[in-house]
Every structure is written in structure tokens, then in C-alpha cells.
Amino acid sequence: MSQTTPRRRIDLAGALLTTLSLICALLWFFPIYWAIITSLRFDQDTITQFSLIPNNPTLSGYIFDFENSKLLTWYMNSTIVSVSITVIAVMVAACTGYAISQLSFPGRTALWWTILASFMVPVSALIVNHFIIIAGIGFLNSYLGIILPMLLTPVTVIVYKQFFDGLPREFREAAVMDGATEFQLLFRVFLPMNWGITTALAIITFIGAWNAFLWPFLAAQDETMMTVTVGITAVQDAFGVAYGRLLSGAVLAGLPVALAYLLFQRRVTQAITLSAGIKG
Amino acid sequence: MVAYILVAPFILIYGWMFIYPTIQMVQMSFTDAHLIGAGKWVGFKNYTRMFKDPTFYKAVVNTSYFVALTVVPGTIVALAIALMVRRLKGWVQSVVLAAFFLPYVLPISVVYLIWNWLTNTQFGMLQGLIIPIVGEPVNIWRTIPWFMPGVAVITIWWTNGFSILLFLAGLRNIPQEIYEAASLDGATRRQMLTRITLPLLWPITVLCLTIQLILQMKIFDQVYLFAVGGRTQSTMVMVQYIYEQAFQKNAGGYAATLAVALFVVVVVFSVLQFQILRIRGQR
């Protein structure tokens, strides 16, 4: 009987902690919720109504954004840029990671050190010279100009290399005996063994590319070439204090990455723990 | 031979976008070049100027202040949240984790618009918390003492998901048997936390701290967005000063010098982080 009292007390403490966790989660999520609610209000209502549920919901902010700003163009730009970066960066990383892990060739060590070095270097220190290089070849305000400097994703190479390092040697030996080429080995044997890793890396690369601010902000000064993350802050002055419209734009800009996360939660978690060098 | 075909795209991209700009940056820091076009060789003039430049020191101090406000407090908050989330089960855990993690995947401009609205001096919801304490609404982004702490709170809200995931992975890697053995020995909840969980999480904590440190030293976006239109000089951070010198003052050479300074500082801390990772890997 003496056992029951402490157990009850622990359960009470547990229930309290659970409640506290839920309250914290609600508070943490509140800014996003409030932005969504505000985006569903008429501009004049945003400064007079503070109810937690919109009593007069409207899509007028969204419609205004589509009609009066270049939102669709920015969306297309962001999609082209992010998808290109994802495809190119992941492909390049897979090939490089494979070569460094499975093949021996002169310069392999130097290559590995280059990857580690680029991992340690702050890309934000290189913005000035990226700008000069991209301007020098006349690529400012072009997709390629936005994409090129953002292809530096050394972590992706490192993750691939470590993944290939961990695979048993016999796979490679057996396939080589069957006369498979290195490309067949990589794309038919090694990558299909774990598409999960490629999916995880692709999603996190896409989210990173979509969210990039500093470089697209410098490379695309022309309104028709802006990505959506740069565009929605550039129109702010033009809109004045119109939070309904501003937050409609914000919700639309955040939607693809929020969906990517919510649909592939496990893959995003995997990518983050892998890139930090932890076994998840 | 086939190896070189496989690594050729990598060499092209990293040679062109990493090695070449790095060399160009160092070379340019010894010239008086404008943003576009070559300049004259001026030796160490830019460097002596930098060490006498009050705005440079201001930027260093502001960046350090921001790092101090975010790195340790953010990691503590992330640890607390991870410990809370860890206790939950099933779909409740997924939903709560998603609520804490979602801000991390949002673009900074979205985060900026959300919080700019919440902190609006006239109509922002958060003024409801500020008025009872201060007695009047505060224009956070135009009041110097409020600016950096404000940006720090938002940054913690925005980037904490990353550390939370690392802590959760670390917690999952602690064998359950240790807790079972401890509870057989009559250990209390508090003892299990302070004697088992926290010490075993220490390597992850160090990892989170170094990743955050390196990340936050490169602060630009938030400070730029919230300060735009105001007096940016007093809230200037390192990357922002590089940006200002290069793109607003057209002083490419001096901007490159500032970039070299940032470069060196970040590389030193990154090498430190790399060593920590290696030590962990060897165990």
C-alpha cells in the first residue's frame, strides 16, 4: 500500500508537465496562427478586430497580392531556382561522395580537404566576390546567376560519403565482377539501396534554397527576377500598412516549405541529424 | 579515369564559386578597388584602417552581443523543450514537435513579416504584454536597447527547431536500461535528470552550442530587415557592414578586408567544432 502514494504524486506531476508542454507548444505556434488569421481579414479589420477566430473571413488579401504584385512571377522564379539547385546539388554531391568513398585516384585527399574547408568557410563572407564574378559574366538578374553560388552544399557531399563508406565492400566487388560500370554501380546499386537518404537530402536542400535571402536579394534587383522570399519584403513600402495583404503574401511564401516539412517530417528530421553527424 | 568524370562538376562548381572567390577576396583586400573594376595595390592600408574604424568595432560588439543573447539561452530553451517533448507519446508528441519545429523551415522574410505585425507599435498583439510592464507601447525596432534582445528572441523562436531535433536524437540514444537500473536503486526523477540525462547529453550540448555559435556570428537577414529605414549604424553587425561598404559605399577593397576578418574568425571556430566532432567520432 505504501507504494501507491508516490506513484500517484508522480502521475500528478506528469499530468502537470504534459499540460505545460501543450501550453508552451500553443504559445510557440501562436505567431504563425495569428499571421494566418490576419491574412484572412480585410485590411481595415486587422487593426480593429483582435478575436482569435476571424468573424468576417475573406480572401481579399490573397486576391490583391495576385492582382497587384508580381507574386506569381516570384513564385515561378523561386520554384525554378529551388528545384534546379536541389537537382544539381544533390546529383553532384552523390557523384562526388561516391568517387571519394569508393574510388582511389590522385587528388582524392585534396578534394576531401576542399569539401571540409568549404564546410568551415562562411559563404556570407564571399558575397562581395560572388557578386563581382556573377556581374562579370553578365549573370545578374538571371536564374543561373542566382543558382550558381548557392550550389555550395558541402554537407550533402559529406553525408553521401559517410553513407557510401558504411556499405559493405562485397556489393561493389560482386557488381564489378559482373562487369558493371561505375555509373551503373552508383545509380543502379548504391543509390537505390537507400533512396531515403537522397529524399531527405533533397528536401532539406529544397527548403534551404527556397528560404535563401541574402544572395537572391543581391543577385536579383530587378522585380521580375526576384524570388518570393525577397519579393514579399520588397513590396512592403508600396503596400503601406496593410497587414492583411502583407501576411497573405507571407503565408503563400511559407506554404511550400511548411508543406514539405509536414509531409516529410521523418525525412527532414533524418536529414538534420545526419548533417549534424549524429545517428538518428 | 571515370573518377574524374564523376568529380568534374564538383571541381567546376567549387573551383569557380569557392576557391576562386576566396583567393580574389584576399587579393582584393590589399587594393582600393571599387565594387566593379580593379584597384591599386595599397598594402595593409585597409587593415590598419579596419583596426582604427569605430564602426568596425561597433559591428564586432553588436555581433558578439547578439551571439551572447542567442547561443546559450537558445540552447537551454531547446534542451528544455526537448525534455518536454520526449515525455509525450504518439500523435500528441508529433503535433507538439511540429509546433516547435515549424518556424525553422520558414523563410526569414516570412518570420520578419509575422513578428513585425505582432510587435507593431499601435496594433501589435505583443504590445499587450509590453504595456503592463513598461507602461506604454514600445517601438521595438526603433529603440536601441530593445532592438538586439528583440531580434534575439525572434531568432531563438526561428532557429531552435534544429537544436531540439539534435537533443531529441541524443535522448533517444540513451539506453533505457540505465534508467531502469537507476530506478531499482531508488533514484528520484530529479536525480535521473541531473545524474544521468544531462551528463550523457553533454556532447550533444557542446555540438549545439558550436553550431549555433558559428551560425549566429553570420547574422544579417533579421537585423537588416528589422532595421531597414532606421538608423542602421547603431545596430550594425559584421555581415551587414560588409554589405554596406560593398554595395552602398562602393568600397570593394575595404569590404573584402572586412570579409577576410569575418572569414578568419568563423574558420577558427569551425576548426574547433570539427575537432570536437572528430573527438566524438573516435570514441
Image: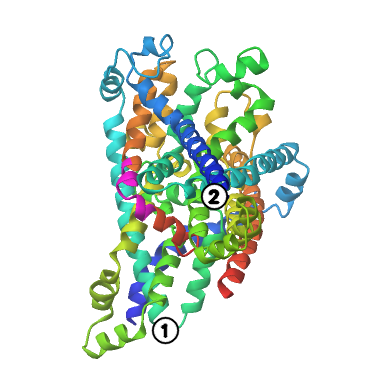
**Residue B102 image offset from top left, x and y in percent:** 41, 40
**Residue B79 image offset from top left, x and y in percent:** 57, 48
Q: Chain of mark 1?
A: A
Q: Is the Cβ of the residue at disc 1 closer than 8 Å to that at disc 2?
A: no
- Quarter of the image for residue A210 reads top left
- Estimate how packed mark 1 is, as few (under 14), some (14 to 19) or many (20 or more) residues with alpha carbons within 10 Å: few
Identify the residue at the far right of this view: B52
Instruction: Report the front residue among B143 and B183.
Output: B183
Residue B105 seen in this snapshot: yes
Q: Chain of mark 2?
A: A
Which region shows up in magenta? A259-268
Question: Which of the two discs, 1 and 2, labels the residue nearer the N terminus?
Answer: 2
Residue B33 seen in this snapshot: no
Residue B271's disc is none
Task: In the rendered view, tell whether residue B200 sits above or below residue B118.
Answer: below
Residue A104's disc is 1
Describe the element under mark 1 as helix, strand or loop: loop
Residue A1's disc is 2
Q: Residue at x 43, y 14 (%)?
A: A50
Q: Magenta region's main secondary structure? A: helix
**Residue A263 image offset from top left, x and y in percent:** 29, 47
Asked if residue A22 is among those painted magenta in the image, a careful observer would answer no
